[in-house]
Image (spheres, coloured by chain):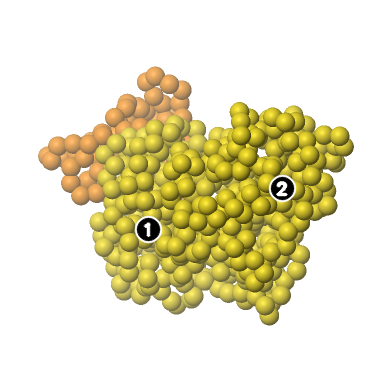
């Protein structure tokens, strides 16, 4: 590059949270502001380089990997503004969820829902379709109602639901392939308290109650422990709400806590245990059947080596083109294995079951699908590609992995590896 | 004061098969830790194998004046103990405790329960 941006870190190694993705990009750049970011993208476009934006690195897929330029938004953080009357707040893309929820809470504002982890940056969590649980709640991308995007030509594109709903539906889950989100305007609400109840139960005793627990509680999910065949049920509700305790006689209460929303919803921002994860979202109506088949397979083949729990959640349908919940309510099922142990064989054995149930893989978690299979799973795949061609005509944001994953834009530009014109 | 700071259980094996309802009748190994002290015990378990380096420590807390029956089957971190493989364990606690070992082998319907006191260390 002719003019090197500040904070250049050449020949640095980039490693994801679990350590499973590690590579040496040509440069890791940390722009101070949107103008610097635009300059980086413009120069990379001119020189035929590939740019990938890194979040907090909590994805297990090589979505950031490139041998060219990685941009980190670590200097572009914090709350930009909030409008309690409109129910919106704008944060910079490099803000972590943990920072965002703290800042919101200090202003008596809150998000409707969270996932299980808050160490991700907001842009990354939104861009990969990170989600929590509850049939009334969309994934975190559903809370994005507008923002600012640096496109593949280095322009800034402002967008919102009113001015460009199609663009919003494309941007919400886009893996940084349409541009780099510098600001995100999120739906927020007045802050609130939740009561968290956790129960342990035998699987056989609890299983028949799955649907009622989903329906009766604001947020319900459960862990299944493969080695003991027991479950932990997690119920979150406004204090005093949710399934009556007398209807949970088959389970033992092990935790009861009433707290502010961001303390009550599972929100691990420090995870001591590093693990690998595969998660698929299947249509809600077949979720129970799918889980039972997965459970049978784990009990039959994987109990010797797999001790980690499986996590089952529900997510509302949405209209985001590449959302795993597009046009359907889902049950999501996660398989987890210690990061130090082999996970490939376990995941490869379970993945076909998810596919039998028309499952869509979480974009940030382990899976083996690529564009030919994925394009069949997403009805609006072609519309997404149209937006992609418009916003990133030269494929600046298309790495080798993204070319395999999403196909489409300028795939030949990145073959066999990113930045061949550089 | 009842107990020792360190214990060893040379026997260890989690059968792969089970008979009967889970989790009660799942074949398993357990270390039963009795803490009669007035403070919580932080217990570290190191697992030894026949053909590879030890794994651990697995860390558990046994509250003051309580007993905790820790199923080896359920340990997750740093890694699950494989079923169908011989192993042994050393238990070290920051306060004196008493350890006993049990193994339920329910591979056949006529279930068998093995129980033995662990070997105490010097301290």
Q: Is residue A315 left or right of residue A118?
A: left
Visual hue assigned to chain B: orange
Chain that bears disc 1? A
Q: Residue furthest right?
A: A3
* Secondary structure state at the residue bearing disc 1: strand
**Residue at (50, 44) in percent of width and height:** A365
Q: Which residue is mark 2?
A: A152
Q: A351 or B31, which is in the foreground?
A: A351
Front residue of B26 and B34:
B26
Q: Is residue B42 visible?
A: no
Q: Which residue is mark 1?
A: A283
Q: Residues within 10 Å of mark 2 (few under 14, many from 20)?
A: many
The residue depicted at 78 percent of the width and 31 percent of the height is: A10
- Looking at the picture, tell me which residue is in the foreground, A352 or B49: A352
Q: Is residue A109 left or right of residue B51?
A: right
Q: Residue placed at 75% from the left, 69% from the top?
A: A81
- CA separation in Å, label 2 and label 1: 34 Å
The colour with which the image depicts chain A is yellow
Residue sitting at the far left: B110
Quarter where residue A215 is shown: bottom left
């Amino acid at each position: 590059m002719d003019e090197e941006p500040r904070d250049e870190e050449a020949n640095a190694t980039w490693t994801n949270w679990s350590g499973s993705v590690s590579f040496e990009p040509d440069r890791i750049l940390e722009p101070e502001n949107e103008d610097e970011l635009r300059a980086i993208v413009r120069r990379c476009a001119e020189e035929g380089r590939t740019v990938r934006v890194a979040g907090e690195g909590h994805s297990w897929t090589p979505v950031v990997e490139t041998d060219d330029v990685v941009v980190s938004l670590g200097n572009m953080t914090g709350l930009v503004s909030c409008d309690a009357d409109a129910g919106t707040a704008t944060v910079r893309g490099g803000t972590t969820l943990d920072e965002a929820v703290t800042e919101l809470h200090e202003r008596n504002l809150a998000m409707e829902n969270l996932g299980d982890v808050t160490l991700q940056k907001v842009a990354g969590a939104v861009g990969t379709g990170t989600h929590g649980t509850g049939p009334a709640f969309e994934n975190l991308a559903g809370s994005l109602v507008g923002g600012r995007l640096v496109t593949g030509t280095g322009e800034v594109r402002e967008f919102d639901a009113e001015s460009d709903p199609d663009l919003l539906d494309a941007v919400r889950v886009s893996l940084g392939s349409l541009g780099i989100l510098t600001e995100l305007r999120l739906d927020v609400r007045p802050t609130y308290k939740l009561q968290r109840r956790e129960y342990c139960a035998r699987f056989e005793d609890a299983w028949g109650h799955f649907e009622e627990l989903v329906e009766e509680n604001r947020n319900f999910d459960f862990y299944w422990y493969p080695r003991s065949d027991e479950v932990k049920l997690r119920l979150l509700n406004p204090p005093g709400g949710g399934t009556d305790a007398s209807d949970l006689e088959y389970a033992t209460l092990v935790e009861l806590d009433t707290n502010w929303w961001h303390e009550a919803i599972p929100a691990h921002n420090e995870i001591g245990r590093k693990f690998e994860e595969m998660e698929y979202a299947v249509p809600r109506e077949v979720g129970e059947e799918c889980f039972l088949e997965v459970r049978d397979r784990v009990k039959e083949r994987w109990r010797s080596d797999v001790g980690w729990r499986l996590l089952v959640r529900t997510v509302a349908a949405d209209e985001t083109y590449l959302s795993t919940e597009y046009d359907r309510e889902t049950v999501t099922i996660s398989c987890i294995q210690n990061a130090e142990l082999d996970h490939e064989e376990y995941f490869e054995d379970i993945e076909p079951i998810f596919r039998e149930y028309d499952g869509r893989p979480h974009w940030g978690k382990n899976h083996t699908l690529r564009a030919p299979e994925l394009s069949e799973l997403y009805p609006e795949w072609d519309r997404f590609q149209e937006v992609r061609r418009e916003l990133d005509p030269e494929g600046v944001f298309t790495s080798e992995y993204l070319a395999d994953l999403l196909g489409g834009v300028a795939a030949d530009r990145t073959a066999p590896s990113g930045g061949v014109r550089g | 004061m009842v107990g020792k700071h360190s214990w060893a259980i040379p026997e260890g094996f989690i059968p792969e098969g089970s008979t009967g309802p889970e989790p009660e009748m799942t074949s398993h190994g357990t270390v039963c830790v009795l803490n009669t002290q007035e403070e919580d015990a932080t217990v570290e378990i190191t697992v030894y194998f026949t053909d590879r380096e030890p794994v651990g420590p697995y860390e558990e807390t046994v509250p003051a004046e309580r007993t905790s029956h820790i199923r080896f089957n359920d340990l997750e971190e740093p890694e699950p103990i494989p079923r169908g493989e011989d192993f042994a364990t050393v238990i070290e606690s920051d306060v004196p405790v008493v350890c006993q070992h049990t193994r339920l082998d329910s591979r056949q319907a006529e279930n068998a329960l093995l129980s033995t006191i662990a070997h105490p260390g010097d301290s």
